[in-house]
Image (cartoon, rainbow, N blue to C red):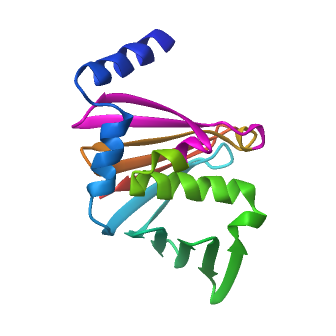
Amino acid sequence: MAMFAVALTQSAQAEGFDLGRLMQLLAAAPAGEVPYTEKKYSSLLATPLVSSGTLAYRRPDTVEKITLKPRAEHFRISGQELMVKRNGKEFRIALSSQPLLDAFAASLRGVLAGDISQLRAYYRLTLSGNEQDWQLAMVPSDEEMTRHVERITVSGHAGRIAQIEVRESTGDRSVLQVN
C-alpha cells in the first residue's frame, strides 16, 4: 500500500502537480457557499447518520456549516473563535482553549485558503492524483490529536473541493460531500 501511495505521489509530481500547485489553485478559488451532504458512520449505529445544509467560506478565515436536516444547527469558525447555535442556544468557544478544535479549524481554513504553512503546523501532508482528480491526506503530527483523529482526507478537482473525510482513531468516520 505504501508503494502505491509513493507511486501516486511521484506521478502527481511528474505531471507538474504538487502541493504548491494545489495550494495555488485553492487560494485562487472564489469564496462562496455550497450545499453539502454529510454521512457519519459509527460502530454504534446500524446505518449512517445523514445531514445536509450549506457550507460557506469567507476570506480570510471564516468557515460556516449550516445544517438544515435532520435538525437545524449552525457552526461558525471565525478568527480564534468557534460559535455553535443549537436548540435556540448559542455557545462560543475560544479555539486557543481547545487544541483539537484549533487543529481541526486549521485543516478547514488551511485547505480553503490554500495555506500550506497553516496545514503543516498541524499535519503531515501527502498529495496523490493529478490536477483534475487529487486527494490530500492530512495525518495529525501532534500525538494528542492522533488519539482522536487518524486522518483527514480532502479530495477534489482543480481548485474545487468535492469531499472531506474525517477518520477518527476509533474507526468512526464522517464523509462530507460538496454538492
Residue 139 inside the magenta-drawn segment: yes
- Residue stretch rendered in magenta on the structure: 119-144
Q: Return the residue nearer the eye: 145 or 115.
A: 115
Q: Return the residue nearer the eye: 83 or 70.
A: 83
Residue 117: image x %, image y %?
51, 46
* Total residue callouts: 0
Q: Return the residue nearer the eye: 131 or 169.
A: 131
Q: Return the residue nearer the eye: 64 or 73.
A: 64
What's the residue at 26%, 35% (across, down)? Answer: 133
Residue 47 lies, with reference to residue 19, above or below; the image says below
What's the residue at 62%, 90% (across, down)? Answer: 88
* Dominant SS in magenta: strand
Residue 48: image x %, image y %?
53, 51
What's the residue at 56%, 41% (across, down)? Answer: 120
Residue 130: image x %, image y %?
26, 30
- Residue that lies at the very extreme toward the bottom in this rendered image: 88
Q: Is residue 8 left or right of residue 126?
A: left
Q: Quadrant of residue 127?
A: top left
Residue 14 lies, with reference to residue 124, above or below; the image says above
Q: Is residue 152 left or right of residue 10?
A: right
What's the residue at 71%, 74% (across, down)? Answer: 93
The reply to whether residue 48 is visible in this rendering is no
Q: Quadrant of residue 20?
A: top left
Residue 145 inside the magenta-drawn segment: no
Residue 56 lies, with reference to residue 91, above or below; the image says above
Which quadrant of the rendered structure holds the C terminus? bottom left
Q: Quadrant of residue 132?
A: top left
Residue 172: image x %, image y %?
63, 43
- Residue that lies at the very extreme toward the top in this rendered image: 3
The reply to whether residue 78 is visible in this rendering is yes
